[in-house]
Amino acid sequence: MAWPVVRLGEIAEQVSRGEPPATGNDYRLLGVRLWGQGAYERETIDGSETKYPTLYRVETGDIVVNKIWARNGSVAVVDENLHGTFGSSEFPTYRTDITRLLPNWFRLFTLTKDLWNQCDKLSRGTSGQNRLRPARFLEVEIPLPPIAEQRRIVERLDRVAKLVETRNQAAADAAADMQALLAKAFARCIEGAPRHPMAEVAPLVRRPVEIDPDGEYPELGVRSFGRGTFHKPVLAGAEVGSKKLFEIATGDLLFNIVFAWEGAVAIAQPEDEGRVGSHRFLSCVPDPGIATTDFLLFYFQTPEGLQRLGEASPGGAGRNRTLGLKKLAAIEVPVPSLENQQWFDRLQAKARRIQAIRVASARDAEALIPALLHEVFNGKMAA
């Protein structure tokens, strides 16, 4: 039998526990994440540090809404760790009738597109910023099974969520162990190996692109922290102006000179072939008789390799730290025998395959909760 759908205003009411902030008193401030990802503690301030004449205390089980971002699922239920924190008037608070609606049932509801879509519709047109008026939130409609059914389903989904969390933590621990083993293998591989400058091992290669004003040029980017390449939007030839572009080829060892010091180094993949980069992206091509690209990339992701890139990127921080071309060419990298490098590359390839399986498994596990929520709020979950 389908569950009744009830307006929130029938089973909850807005509450206000306002306190004028006092100088000398500490106030733990509350924030609400988007897309039902819960509330969190932002910071602790002195009463003199806020512009708001009143702060509002929340308690365990309260529903808290961010008026501006409610349309993006910024709705949460306060857990016991956040009991006694405060929000401004931007965070209206509601208390449920727990004889009809369990706070944890609503917590599950905050994870659904149904709630997000309702909040989006209720926010439209209320102001230039599409704020959700507190009274309108009570127009939200929610499926409402009996309390015993709510409790049973919450407990069941929480058990599943805990299993997923445990599995994800185990996968993260395994990935960290794998990386540690690779680091040890790499250290053994380069022990006693000669060092040669990048200018000899993997010199800079430039492939200038002749710009056609009517042409299109798909750009490539390199993420920091060794997270690979990504595709930027296509750049129209007419928009290039005086900007110089260079073609990128599969297998290039790419450096983003602005963020190389924080690991913005990657290998161009087959799907990156033919894309272009500005002068800020350097393509280095290893001499195949001396070194492999995978081996060099791993080196530049080690603490030593990052230190060398940092030393070659003088300046302050952020965009004021730029990798110098001559300094990059002068970095001396370890060059063991090709046989040893290729052995290590095979080890890396095995580790990547294992990690790919873990990532795919994690995606499947993460998809389980949304699938169960869909079943729950469509009244299809088996008793």
Image (spheres, rainbow, N blue to C red):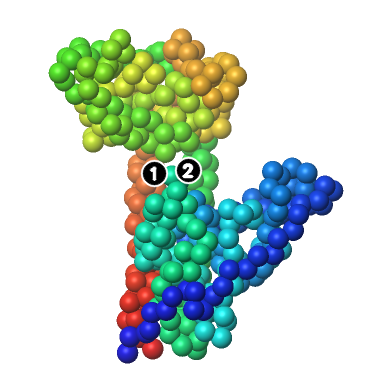
In the rendered image, the vertical position of residue 33 relative to residue 342, given as above or below: below
Residue type for callout 1? Leu
Residue type for callout 2? Leu
Mark 1 secondary-structure assignment: helix
Looking at the image, the residue that sits furthest to the right is 24
Viewer-proximal residue, 297 or 375? 375
209 sits left or right of 58 in the view: left
Q: Are marks 1 and 2 in contact (CB under 8 Å)?
A: yes
Tell me the CA gap for discs 1 and 2: 8 Å
Q: Quadrant of residue 298?
A: top left
Q: Which residue is mark 1?
A: 347
- Residue 230: x %, y % from top left: 33, 35
Q: Which mark is residue 182?
A: 2
Locate the N terminus and report the quarter of the image it occupies.
bottom left
Q: Name which residue lies at 46% across and 9% down.
A: 326
Q: Name which residue lies at 56% across and 32% down.
A: 303
- Residue 23: x %, y % from top left: 82, 47
Mark 2 secondary-structure assignment: helix
Answer with mark 1 or mark 2, whichever residue precedes in sequence.
Answer: 2
Viewer-proximal residue, 275 or 103? 103
In the rendered image, the vertical position of residue 121 relative to residue 315, given as above or below: below
- Residue 132: x %, y % from top left: 47, 56
